[in-house]
Every structure is written in C-alpha cells, then in structure tokens.
C-alpha cells in the first residue's frame, strides 16, 4: 500500500521494550476503533491502564503519539499487503490481491479514525504519502500486466492518474462524503472497476 517508513514512530528499544511495544499495539487498536481527537493523554492512559508518564515514554506529546500511531498503522499494513502480493504470480491476481489487501487493511479502522486523520495535518500527511506510494505501486502492477499481454493496451500513465485521483479523494474523505462508502469499501469498488476495465 504503502511506504514502510517508520519516521515519526516511537522508539521501542531498550529496557521494557516488549511492554512498550505491546502498549503501543493496544494504543493503535484503540485509536483506529475510536479515533483520537476526543482523547486527552489522561484519558488514553486510563483506557490503556497505564500512567501518563508511560505514554510519554512512547512519545513526547499527544501529537507525536498520534503521528506515531498512524505511521505504525500504515507500516504494519504495508507488510501484510506486500505479503499478499508476493504470494501471486499472475498479473491479474497480483493486482486483485493488492487492492483487496489494501481494502482488508483499512476495513478495521472506523470512519472516525479517518475523519480525525484528515483533520490533523501531521497524520493527514502520512496518509497522503502512503496513498501516493500505493498509486505508484498500482501503476507498476498495471505495467506488468500490459507487458505480459493479460491486460488490454491502455495508456498506463493516464490510467495511473485516474486511479491516483480516486485514491486521493478517498484519502481526503471526499468519496465517503459523496457516496457514503467507507475507505475500505471504496478500495473494493475501485478494485472491481479496475479489473473489469483492464482484463481482456
């Protein structure tokens, strides 16, 4: 999906690293389910049954913690999406596997999480960067399919531009507003349109 940069993610090394890593996973699960804008650090600490000082051990401020959560969410998703892609050899199956895996990774995140991401600049920048990376990956997969003769001859740059535009609209919550589709549902619909339009 997604670039795997961990810049901005909390450091989880040193003494107590296993517990901090576990705590961070719990934080990610909480935030993708309920968003983050409405939480204070005190409330997050209470929900996670830890001290606020422990949270400061993950990041220096709520803003840094939130950005770290978003980075971690996409970094983890990247590994699983690329794993699904690596399991396929046929270009049609590869494109389908990629888009379905993206949809599957986004599905557990509640709309409030994406709304909060869109409203918070540092988090929105992470999502946008990952969206651009995903669009580039899709262009590569289309090029592979055209070269192998299993996709119709299309103007790959134009197709990639259209796809990128839709993905940016999904990321910016415009598709959700216009259609009522969650981000994962929108990616599933995009996969259906792409596969029907490209395959011979």
Image: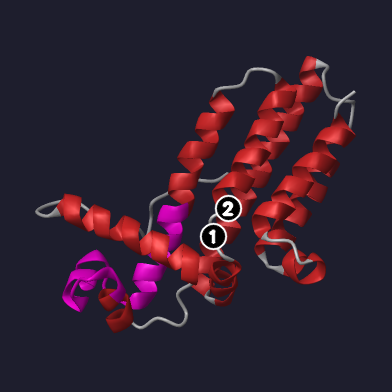
**Residue at image mark 2:** 106
| Label 1 close to label 2 by CB (< 8 Å) | yes
At which x and y percent is residue 198?
A: 86, 31
Query: Is most of the magenta stretch helix, strand or loop?
Result: helix
Q: Is 153 inside the magenta-drawn segment?
A: no
Q: Is residue 23 left or right of residue 69?
A: left
Q: Label 1: which residue? A: 109
Q: Quadrant of residue 175?
A: bottom right
Indicate the position of residue 63 as horizontal and vertical percent values: 38, 75
Placement of the N terminus among the 4 image quadrants: top right
Residue shown at the point (53%, 55%) measured from the top left: 108
Residue at 33% x, 60% y: name it.
26
- Label 2: state its secondary structure: helix
Q: Quadrant of residue 54?
A: bottom left
**In the image, residue 66 lies in the stretch drawn in magenta:** yes
Q: Height in image: 112 above or below 193? A: below
**Which element carries disc 1, helix, strand or loop?**
loop
C-alpha gap between disc 1 and disc 2: 6 Å
Residue 97 x %, y %? 65, 32
**Which segment did they paint magenta?**
47-73
- Image quarter where the C terminus lies is top right
Q: Residue at x 12, y 55 (%)?
A: 16
Residue occupying the far left of the picture: 15
Q: Say how the picture is coloured.
A: secondary structure
Q: Which dot marks residue 67?
A: none
Can residue 174 be seen here? The reply is yes
Answer above or below: position of 171 versus 43: above
Check the image and report above or below for 191 versus 72.
above
């Amino acid at each position: 999906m997604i670039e795997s940069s961990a810049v901005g993610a909390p450091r989880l090394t040193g003494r107590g690293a296993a517990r901090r890593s576990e705590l961070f996973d719990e934080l990610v699960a909480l935030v993708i389910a309920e968003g983050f804008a409405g939480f204070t650090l005190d409330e997050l600490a209470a929900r996670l049954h830890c001290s606020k000082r422990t949270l400061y051990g993950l990041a220096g401020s709520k803003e840094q913690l939130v950005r770290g959560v978003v980075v971690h969410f996409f970094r983890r998703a990247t590994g699983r999406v690329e794993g699904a892609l690596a399991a396929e050899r046929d270009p049609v199956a590869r494109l389908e596997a990629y888009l379905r895996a993206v949809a599957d990774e986004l599905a557990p995140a509640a709309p409030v999480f994406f709304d909060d991401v869109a409203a918070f600049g540092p988090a929105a920048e992470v999502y946008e960067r990952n969206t651009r990376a995903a669009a580039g990956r899709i262009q590569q997969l289309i090029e592979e399919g055209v070269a192998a003769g299993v996709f119709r001859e299309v103007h790959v740059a134009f197709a990639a531009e259209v796809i990128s535009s839709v993905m940016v609209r999904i990321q910016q919550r415009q598709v959700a507003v216009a259609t009522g589709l969650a981000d994962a549902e929108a990616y599933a619909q995009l996969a259906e349109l792409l596969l029907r339009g490209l395959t011979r």
